[in-house]
Image (cartoon, rainbow, N blue to C red):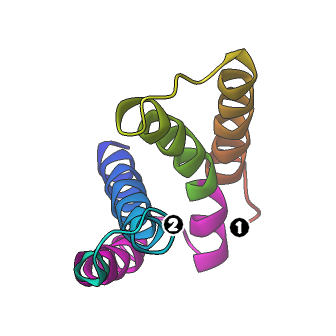
Amino acid sequence: MGKMIAVYAGAALAEIAGCFAFWAWARLGKSAWWLAPGVVSLVAFAWLLTRSDADAAGRAYAAYGGVYIVASLAWLWLVEGAAPDRWDFAGAALSLVGAGVILFGPRPA
């Protein structure tokens, strides 16, 4: 369980950082040099998701979606300085419940 949390948390940080680098270049007028670490982060994101213990890629990606939502709201708050509201928190909680059902639901043998 600890490995899975670390993999998904690392993947979320890498994906958000990579996408934000592109956002900064395209929308905030930052230098094109922001793209290089962005690409490296996105490659790290893809590699980290392959480290998931899920039995199928699609299931790993679907479960990761809940973690990504929570991490995105943390980024919103900590990096962009905009506090999430109660609807953000409610949606994040729902997404984590969904991710848990996907990951831990009983599967036929």
Q: Position of residue 1 (x, y in %)?
A: 38, 44
Residue 21 falls in which quadrant of the image? bottom left
Would you say the magenta stretch is mainly helix, strand or loop? helix
- The three-letter amino acid code for the residue at tag 1 is Ala
Image: 28 above or below 39: above
Q: Position of residue 69 (x, y in %)?
A: 59, 45
Tag 1–tag 2 contact (CB < 8 Å)? no
Q: Nearer the viewer, mark 1 or mark 2?
A: 2
Question: Is 40 a magenta residue?
Answer: yes
Q: Position of residue 10 (x, y in %)?
A: 31, 56
Q: Which residues are magenta?
A: 36-63
Query: In the image, is 90 to the left or to the right of 2?
Result: right
Residue in the picture at 38% in, 61% down: 11
Query: In the image, is 13 to the left or to the right of 64?
Result: left
What is the count of numbered marks?
2
Image: 5 above or below 26: above
- The three-letter amino acid code for the residue at tag 2 is Arg
Mark 1 — residue? 109
